[in-house]
Amino acid sequence: MGEIEQFFYCPYCGENISMLIDLNYTNQLYTEDCEVCCRPIEINFTAVDGAIESWKASRSD
């Protein structure tokens, strides 16, 4: 299926950031640091038929 670039706002600093999402996995939950403020963001998403169906980026603390 490939990858897609997902844009969202950091729940800490409010910066608009993006990350590449691997659509080969239908459900993912993981933590990744903000590229601006370096705080941990919990990423939770569901992909269906090569598109993101649900997306949540929240504080990890």
Image (cartoon, helix red, strand yellow):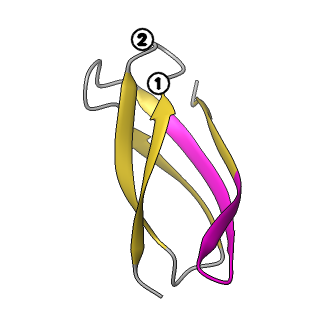
SS of the residue under disc 2? loop
Amino acid type, callout 1 = Cys
Please state which of residues 34 and 55 is positioned toward the viewer in this rendering. Answer: 55
Residue indicated by mark 1: 10
Q: Report crowding for label 1: few under 14, some 14 to 19, many 20 or more residues within 10 A (C-alpha).
A: many
Residues shaded magenta: 41-54
- The disc label shown at residue 13, or none: 2
Front position in the image: 17 or 34: 17
Q: Quadrant of residue 3?
A: bottom left
Q: Is residue 5 left or right of residue 49?
A: left
Classify residue 52 as left or right of residue 10: right
Q: Is residue 33 magenta?
A: no
Q: Amino acid at mark 2?
A: Cys
Secondary structure beneath label 1: loop
Horizontal arrangement in the rendering, residue 9 relative to residue 58 (left or right): left
- Residue that lies at the very extreme toward the top in this rendered image: 13
State left or right for residue 33 relative to residue 49.
left
- Rendered location of residue 20, percent (x, y): 36, 59
Image coords of residue 60 (percent x, y): 57, 31
Residues tagged 1 and 2 counted as in contact (Cβ below 8 A):
yes
